[in-house]
Amino acid sequence: MTKHILGFDVGGTKISAVIGNDRGEILSNVRKPTVKHLGKKRLLDEFYSMGTKAMELAELDNIDSIGIDFAGLVDREKGVVVSSPNILGLDNFKVVEEVEKHFGVPTVLENDATAATIAERIFGSGRGVDNFVYLTLSTGIGGGAFLNGKLYRGVHGMAGEFGHMVVMSNGPNCGCGRKGCLEAIAGGKGIARRVSENISAVRDSALFSKITPDKIDAEMVFKYMEEGDMFAQLIVEETIYYLAVGIVNVINILDPEVMIIGGGISRAGKLLFDPLRAAVNEEFKSMKRPVKILQGLDNGPDLAPISIPLYNF
């Protein structure tokens, strides 16, 4: 019998309510922009109304379970959001208890990057692979890993913070407080910052000079590179070099069979993956080994919350 799952994804730019099933089919999707000052009560109200709307669109009266993923620190066992960088006032938020009470079905909570890793295990390139690492390249950089067939969480449930390895000594400040983290250089915000900080190069670029710095994002940088902008080419090459350094660090530590790259930046496709694979091979030096670098699920953000209860049941 097909299981139908309601998933909530709470990210930096959007909140979504998704209905999916255990075959990986998405039946409906309701999205709203993230409001930083939403707070606990208003967020729950959004969950209730968006979840009901998603069920109506999917023409379902009942669901079997609910998965919720948050960017930030969560306590999966207690069903508590410890802290969230995207919405203020959610510290120690007992979200599972409230959502279960309203919808009356089992509810599971996960960190968003961990949920995306689970989605790759169930529906993506991690199926049948006992040792793989998932790296999400989005506004920031995070990820997760399956080792010997099991999700590796770490002692404090914080494993997979690959974006916070230092790859440039005394590099740019990172939101975590360190300098030169991979996220600060190769995450979406880091890429945009590196462009906008180089005022003279922006002014000399026929494409970048036409837009204001606050409109620059990683997608635009890859697009402009494809259109022949030399400054965009330089930024992308630098980004790929530091990504390769970080990826080889992870491979040297965990020795996975597969590295799966997901997140918004991965949608650059061949513009990212062809030079990244070449850069990783070069960066291996004498430690080279046959590790596949594969693109993550196209609809990973939708499948992530759907996957959580499927893995835990």
Image: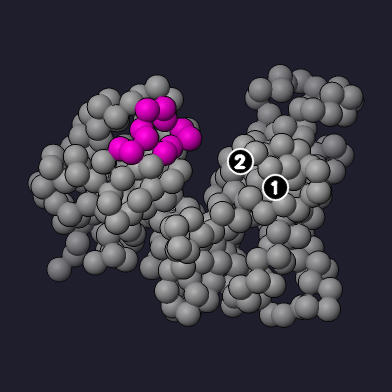
Q: Main secondary structure of the magenta part?
A: loop
Q: Residue at x 13, y 39 (%)?
A: 102
In the image, the segment drawn in magenta is 83-93
Q: Nearer the viewer, residue 144 or 276?
A: 144
Residue at 51%, 60% (x, y): give it.
159
Q: Residue at x 46, y 33 (%)?
A: 86
Q: Amino acid at mark 1?
A: Cys
Q: Quadrant of residue 101?
A: top left
Tell me if label 1 and label 2 are in contact, CB under 8 Å.
Answer: yes
Q: Amino acid type of disc 2?
A: Cys
Which residue, given by chain and number where applicable, does mark 2 sit on? 176
* Relative image position of residue 85 (x, y in whole percent): 48, 35
Give the side of residue 244 with respect to residue 86, left or right: right
**Residue 185 can be seen in this image:** no
Residue 45: percent from the left, percent from the top? Answer: 23, 29
Across and down, in percent, residue 198 comes to 84, 29
